[in-house]
Image: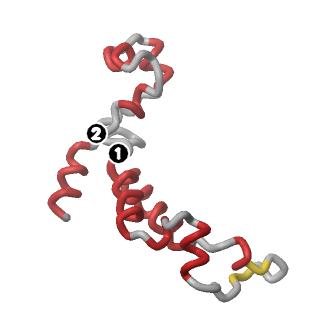
Amino acid sequence: LEDYVSSIARMYRPNDFHNFDHASHVVQSVTKILSRVVTPDSIDYQEMAYKQQKGAAKLHEYTYGITSDPLTQFACAFSALIHDVDHSGVPNAVLVKEQSDIAVHYKNKSVAEQNSV
């Protein structure tokens, strides 16, 4: 796994924002968010505190299984890891305005996003 993640890291370009550091932060955020999901009735809004969870089955139903399926959680983290691979760091509007090859290829629609892995 470490070798694979290293391979992905090398595919990122060294630009100011859409780089591997950004991807790492997104992975960390996604996994944190997944670990913090609760059902709406698990929050005491008066005290602004969590109540005792009432079983994994209810949370499973509420989240359509996302919180209890390891493969789905892995897919979310993996998607976060690769979401900006090969991003040039140039905004879509600039790519379209300059009629770059990649913008023409993707018909000026979500250019950088479609170019991701």
Residue 83, quarter of the rendered image: top left
Residue in the picture at 35% in, 65% down: 71
Residue 104 picture location, percent across and down: 37, 13
Of labels 2 and 1, earlier in sequence is 2
Does residue 42 lie above or below 3 as drawn?
below
Residue 24 picture location, percent across and down: 37, 57
Q: Label 2 vs label 1: CA separation?
A: 6 Å
Query: On the rendered image, what quadrant is the N terminus found in?
Result: bottom left
Amino acid type, residue under disc 2 in the picture: Arg
Residue 98, quarter of the rendered image: top left
Q: Is residue 98 left or right of residue 41?
A: left
Instruction: For label 2, count other residues whose C-alpha is less than 10 Å away and answer few (under 14), some (14-19) or many (20+).
Output: some
Instruction: For label 1, count other residues whose C-alpha is less than 10 Å away and answer few (under 14), some (14-19) or many (20+).
Output: many
Does residue 43 lie above or below 13 as drawn?
below
Determine which of the numbered discs, if any, sits on residue 13 in the image. 2
Determine which of the numbered discs, if any, sits on residue 54 in the image. none
Q: Is residue 1 left or right of residue 98?
A: left
Amino acid type, residue under disc 1 in the picture: Asn
Which residue is most to the left? Answer: 3
Q: Is residue 9 left or right of residue 114?
A: left
Q: Nearer the viewer, residue 68 or 113?
A: 68
Residue in the picture at 49% in, 65% down: 66
Label 1: state its secondary structure: loop
Residue in the picture at 37% in, 42% down: 84
Q: What residue does disc 1 label?
A: 19
